[in-house]
Amino acid sequence: MKEKFLSLEEFIKKEKEKARKLRQTRWWRRQLEKGVCYYCGKEVGAKNLTMDHKIPLSRWGTSDRINIVPCCKECNNKKKYLLPWEWEEYVKRLKITNVEEG
């Protein structure tokens, strides 16, 4: 029997569908209710949070709870396709700045 491997495009399509289903769950609604960005820690309110994959789909991350976090649009736009360890230094600077301002 020949195994079929998904192309990156097929994989992303499949994982986006999983993410759409996850958005409808009680678990995701509870994440949003906190109103806090996972990365910068700012309180932005549930309506201003987006779903982010810590390991991006474009880098073979999955749409599982362990890989999905709520984040503000600003962080989501800045993070893009970076992996957690590539993004870590920026996040550290953000949290230090927020503590100093707060």
Image (cartoon, rainbow, N blue to C red):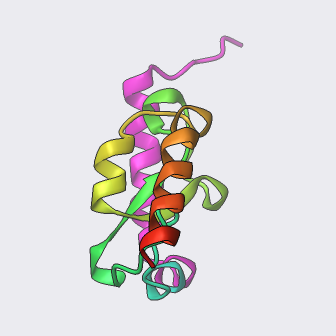
Q: Main secondary structure of the magenta part?
A: helix
Residue at figure coordinates x 36%, y 54% from the top left: 75
Give the x, y percent position of residue 42.
Answer: 42, 73
Residue at figure coordinates x 57%, y 79% from the top left: 27
Q: Is residue 57 in view?
A: yes
Q: Is residue 15 left or right of 88 when viewed as pictured?
A: left
Give the x, y percent position of residue 22.
Answer: 49, 67
- In this view, the residue in front, 63 or 32, is 32
Give the x, y percent position of residue 35.
Answer: 42, 83
* Residue 5 inside the magenta-drawn segment: yes
Q: Is residue 39 in view?
A: no
Q: Residue furthest top?
A: 2
Q: Quadrant of the N terminus?
A: top right
Q: Is residue 28 above or below residue 65?
A: below
Q: Is residue 50 above or below residue 74?
A: below
Give the x, y percent position of residue 62.
Answer: 56, 44
Q: Residue furthest front?
A: 100
Q: Is residue 72 left or right of 84 when viewed as pictured?
A: left
Residue at figure coordinates x 45%, y 79% from the top left: 102
Residue at figure coordinates x 41%, y 36% from the top left: 12
Residue interval drawn in magenta: 1-29
Q: Residue furthest right?
A: 1
* Residue 25 inside the magenta-drawn segment: yes
Instruction: Count every numbered label the image shows and give the total.
Output: 0
Q: Is residue 92 left or right of 3 when viewed as pictured?
A: left
